[in-house]
Image: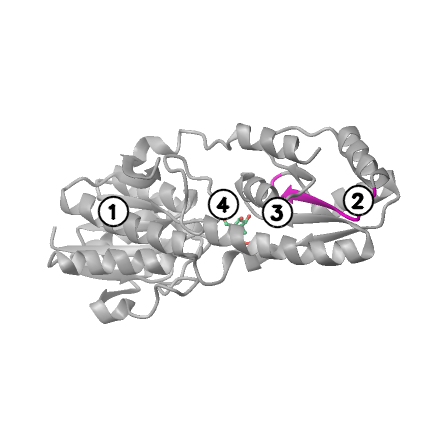
Amino acid sequence: MKRIGVLTSGGDSPGMNAAVRAVVRKAIYHDVEIYGVYNGYAGLIAGNIEKLELGSVGDIIHRGGTKLFTARCPEFKTVEGREKGIEQLKKFGIEGLVVIGGDGSYMGAKKLTEHGFPCVGVPGTIDNDIPGTDFTIGFDTALNTVIDAIDKIRDTATSHERTYVIEVMGRHAGDIALWAGLAGGAETILIPEADYDMEDIIDRLKRGHERGKKHSIIIIAEGVGSGVEFGEKIEKETQFETRVSVLGHIQRGGSPTAADRVLASRLGAYAVELLLEGRGGRCVGIQNNKLVDHDILEILDTEHTVDQSMYRLSKELSI
Ligand code: F6P
């Protein structure tokens, strides 16, 4: 393989730039030409493609967002859309593609692979919901952003003796809520992967209040439902003054943590290695701190799961 491409797609995540940098530098290290596809699959269809040099990825390892920009592209879900994309890849002489993104992006890479075009998926999303890897690029940074918010909210919650419901992102997955809730000492964590008992939550809040607790923090994953509605129920049932914070897109921005930069560098470089070994149709990940790769045609059939033991622990520690 003498010429490969790289794109970022779907929701951006901190560390995507570090991954792009690793792909570009690793390719050039092996004397392979590297082309950046701008705006994800939409840019692929439009032929928004340009050759990248070593300097093209200078000064980006510490930046959030993605230098290649990103998009969600319904047209790429159609056969016609994908054929247009493949035409562009051929036009530029690109023989393999690294796709950095979440499960929608993996789906695109899977379809390209089925069309016979070699792709390697790199997991980039704050949601940590991609099967085949313990961690996705951006999760650690998002987690630290949430922790920072929880710590700050805790200060004002204590001063005013309030209950706070904090809604976090994660789409259908509860990883951000669970990890942030555990690290932030939340009293209650609600995730889509576990049922909750409203009476039990109310009892806990009341017991805490009787013990003289000055505040309560409840973390709700967006996949469970609306934090605002949940907050209203809590206030009605407990009569405790309750406020809701929906953290939103601040969770997607910011300078990536060291952990995300290292993960992105390792995964990006590994994706290039696979393409150069002629092993397209894979997706990369990290499991037990070892780089791994899986068949991209099969990985999306595997379900992502949260660590239930961590969920149980969070309950034990917040009695
Ligand atoms: O997948 C990342 C994510 O931030 C999810 O956590 C969230 O549900 C979604 O993207 C929001 O998407 P958008 O930025 O398109 O509103």
The residue nearer to you, when weighing 165 against 13, is 165
The image's colouring method is one colour
Where residue 155 sits: x, y (%)? 71, 57
Query: Disc 3 vs disc 4: Cβ atoms closer than 8 Å?
Result: no
Residue wearing tag 2: 213
Question: Ligand 1 closer than 8 Å to the CB at disc 3?
Answer: no
Q: What crowding class fits label 4: few (fewer than 14 Cα within 10 Å), some (14-19), or many (20 or more)?
A: many
| Magenta residue check for 215 | yes
Residue wearing tag 3: 184
Q: In this view, does 147 lie to the left or right of 122?
A: right
**Residue 42 visible here:** no
Residue wearing tag 4: 127
Disc nearer the start of the sequence (1/2): 2
Residue at the extreme front of the image, as rendered: 211
Mark 2: secondary structure: loop
Q: What's the distance in space between the residues labelled 1 and 3, CA to CA?
A: 34 Å
Question: Ligand 1 closer than 8 Å to the CB at disc 4?
Answer: yes
Q: What range of the chain is rendered magenta? A: 212-223
Residue wearing tag 1: 271
The residue sitting at 30% across, 53% down in the picture is: 265
Where residue 71 sits: x, y (%)? 43, 57
Disc nearer the start of the sequence (4/1): 4
Q: What's the distance in space between the residues labelled 3 and 2, CA to CA?
A: 16 Å
Q: What's the distance in space between the residues labelled 4 and 1, CA to CA?
A: 21 Å
